[in-house]
Image: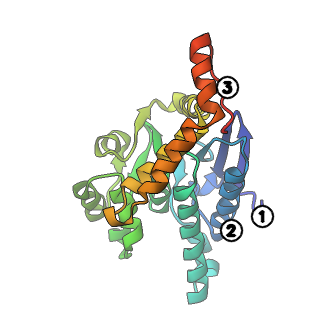
């Protein structure tokens, strides 16, 4: 990695991407966003990685947004701003369109860019300590269509408006009620819970899991833009796979299947 502020590790079919800036509540700099793209690309290319988990270092924050201390160097000039915006959007998009399932493991602050990052993941599992906010209205910032749309893919329009209008911090339980997170667990249990959850997904048939991710994405598009032929092809590949044979054989033999993604 070009920076020690990002950590990547792999174990048991899980790729862990860690935002490692705990002294600043894991605020993100340009080099961190660029490194995140490299990590995600590596995880996607590695067949041994079946699930991607995103987390922040320490127990105080997931990601608390942009590292303001870097603004003088990274966002002072228009060209620098454009590079920063390309890097952030590149990381968001890479995570969102990754063919493998992604999980945000959230504890402490999940603010601004951290909330944007979290909604780019397929699943969000939070500890009771998690706090969520998009404080744009307190800073006079504009939020473009793409980022608003990503939030709307997760929560209802009414809740999206509440998040933006109030700019306040929401508790983990409030976030769960809104549909912003899938699960809320005790802080002491979060890492073990997410690890077990990711392992469970990693042990399932990869072709089935990735096909569902793609089909859900197609279903969320406008009807005229949906690729239904692709959806049918993804289902056909599942039934034609060695994993489908393995799944049936394991069921007959009353054992745990070993799926290989082919």
* Callouts 3 and 2 close, C-beta under 8 Å: no
Horizontally, residue 122 falls left or right of residue 11, namely left
Label ID, residue 2: 1
Q: Earlier in the sequence, mark 2 or mark 1?
A: 1
Residue farthest to the top, as pictured: 254
Label ID, residue 258: 3
| Viewer-side residue, 232 vs 207 | 232
| Viewer-side residue, 174 vs 257 | 257
- Counting from the top left corner in percent of width and height, residue 231 is at 46, 51
Q: CA distance from mark 3 to mark 2?
A: 39 Å
Secondary structure beneath label 2: helix
Name which residue lies at 41% across and 69% down.
146
Q: Quadrant of the N terminus?
A: bottom right
Label ID, residue 170: none
Label ID, residue 31: 2
Residue 71 in sight in this render: yes
* Callouts 2 and 1 close, C-beta under 8 Å: yes
Q: CA distance from mark 3 to mark 1?
A: 36 Å
- Counting from the top left corner in percent of width and height, residue 124 is at 46, 43
- Counting from the top left corner in percent of width and height, residue 126 is at 46, 39
Q: Residues within 10 Å of mark 2 (few under 14, many from 20)?
A: some
Secondary structure beneath label 1: loop
């Amino acid at each position: 990695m070009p920076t020690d502020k990002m950590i990547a590790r792999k174990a048991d079919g899980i790729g862990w991407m860690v935002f490692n800036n705990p002294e600043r509540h894991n605020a993100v700099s340009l080099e961190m966003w660029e490194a995140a793209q490299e990590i995600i690309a590596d995880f996607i290319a590695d067949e041994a990685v079946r699930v991607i988990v995103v987390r922040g270092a320490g127990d105080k924050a997931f990601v608390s947004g942009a590292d303001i201390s870097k603004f003088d160097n990274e966002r002072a000039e228009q060209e620098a701003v454009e590079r920063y915006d390309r890097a952030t959007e590149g990381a968001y998009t890479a995570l969102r369109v990754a063919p493998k399932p992604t999980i945000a493991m959230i504890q402490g602050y999940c603010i601004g860019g951290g909330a944007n990052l979290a909604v780019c993941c397929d699943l969000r599992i939070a500890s009771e300590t998690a706090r969520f906010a998009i404080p744009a209205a307190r800073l006079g910032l504009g939020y473009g269509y793409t980022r608003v749309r990503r939030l709307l893919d997760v929560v209802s329009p009414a809740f999206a408006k509440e998040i933006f209008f109030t700019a306040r911090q929401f508790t983990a339980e409030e976030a769960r009620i809104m549909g912003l997170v899938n699960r809320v667990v005790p802080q002491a249990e979060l890492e073990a819970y997410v690890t077990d959850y990711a392992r469970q997904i990693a042990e399932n048939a990869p072709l089935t899991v990735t096909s569902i991710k793609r089909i859900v994405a197609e279903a969320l598009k406008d009807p005229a833009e949906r690729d239904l032929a692709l959806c049918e092809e993804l289902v056909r590949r599942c039934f034609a796979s060695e994993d489908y044979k393995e799944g049936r054989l394991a069921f007959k033999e009353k054992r745990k299947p070993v799926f290989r993604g082919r």
